[in-house]
Amino acid sequence: MSKEVGISGFAVYVPPYRVDLQDWCQWTDSPWDKTSAVIGRSFRMRGPDQSVYTMAATAVMRLIDSYDIDPRRVGFLGLGTESSTDNSAGAVIIKGMLDEALQTRGLPPINRYCEVPELKHACLGGIYAMKYGLRYLALEEENRCAIVVSADIAEYARGSSGEPTQGAGAVAMLLETDPGLLRVHLQDIGSASAYRAVDFRKPVMRNLIRGKLNCHFQDLPVFNGKYSTTCYLDETLHALYDMMRRLDCTPTDYYQSLTAAFMHRPYHRMPMTSFAMSYLFGLAHDGAAGLEELEAYCRNADLDVDAVLDEMNSTPDVLQLVKDRNIDADVYPLSVHLLKEFRTSEVFTQTLAAKMSLGSEAMKDIGNVYCAALPAWIAAGLEEAVMQGRELAGGKILAVGYGSGDAAEAIPMTLADNWREPASRIGFMAALEPYQNLTQAQYESLHDTGDAVGLLEADYGFLIESVGSSANPEFSDEGIEYYRYLR
């Protein structure tokens, strides 16, 4: 492509209402050792006067302030979410909040000639919005920038297996030509998609049946944990294969050349499992040297390498598991067994795990934020690299997005020469402060009713001021949110 496009900045917002998972384990009689190792340390919850739109607008305002963005340059404002509560408008709601707040501060509003799409595909909506924004810039001839904000509210029923993986928050990204942080190689992005039926869905009818279509709207998902893991592994493998094909490179060489890798993060352990599995599958297509390494892992696991290769070269019909009512079956059973052995290898611990270490610890404290999970991890990782004094200019970065249902995107990027200055403005760790650890009673009440006694009041950003209730021929605003801005 004739233009270089990519990311020049990040800004993060998470609500202050925090559930400490060690406390949660005590409330629910769950094992803390397992929870901390697999999931993380805490998650955030939206407040009673917050919605996905207020969180998104707050993140974008932080981005504008942190990177001194002239709102008149913004020609694209995209929202990626699966938590929207308006089936008509989307990003324009955020634009309306921002325009009013900017003008109260004596600043110009966002460009009137600005695109305002909302994109939805489970946790991949934000990455799709980013691709949309980058394509916009690649074709735009005027001096414009794009802003994409990924925002979500992850809620699960109390007592379900998904309960400790809840979360809420938003991440805004500044996209530009000649980007200051990350050059995104748009033409080399690998894509994959396949319909999976019951992987993870949010049918409106489910929530109508549950009687929750009211001011405290809970969009609780239909999900099947083991099957969802199978879908995640299968689709990310296909997206990475497509990216390698476009890059015309061998998987082992590419993985060895990486400075860092980030993947969609529903909980702490999942991305590392997927990354390691993709490495093993890469060996199967990596010539004699790759096969030799794979054979060594197979011997250690007491597996027949030819049987493993047959499985890795197969094309399992994951949807058939649903049709057969056999969703707990493994489509790659030998590879999963091999992975357990591979986790003890030096390559895993010193190469793969090391490449996914940046920002990983910080991410244990925000929970699953769906569309915002991958952008948040990249932001946390780049900020940590600055704090550690790492010299990473020109380094290769891999980002893999995933959305249940299911689809994946494998995105090759390169760190810009002067990445440290914009990375130092991210403020990821600052966005985690201040916070309020919720009591069991506060958590249960906030989860079930949308409010709780003794909550700290927000002191920054956008809040819902009121919700319209008029429904008559003269004026109708039933269910419409009105907002206010706290400077």
Image (cartoon, rainbow, N blue to C red):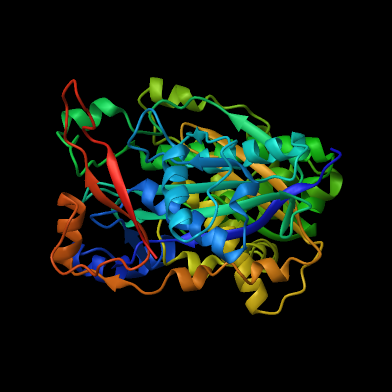
The N terminus, quarter of image: top right
Please provide percent x and percent y for residue 134: 68, 41
**Residue 182 visible in the displayed image:** yes
- 202 is higher (above) or lower (below) than 80: above
Please provide percent x and percent y for residue 120: 47, 34
Looking at the image, which residue is at 55% across and 42% down? 77
- 313 is higher (above) or lower (below) than 99: above
| In front of the other: 196 or 63 | 63
Looking at the image, which residue is at 82% across and 62% down? 394
- 41 is higher (above) or lower (below) than 202: below
**Residue 369 visible in the displayed image:** no
Drawn side of residue 444 relative to residue 198, left or right: left
Looking at the image, which residue is at 21% across and 32% down? 478
| In front of the other: 241 or 88 | 88
Residue 139 figure quarter = top right
Please provide percent x and percent y for residue 375: 56, 54
The C terminus, quarter of image: bottom left
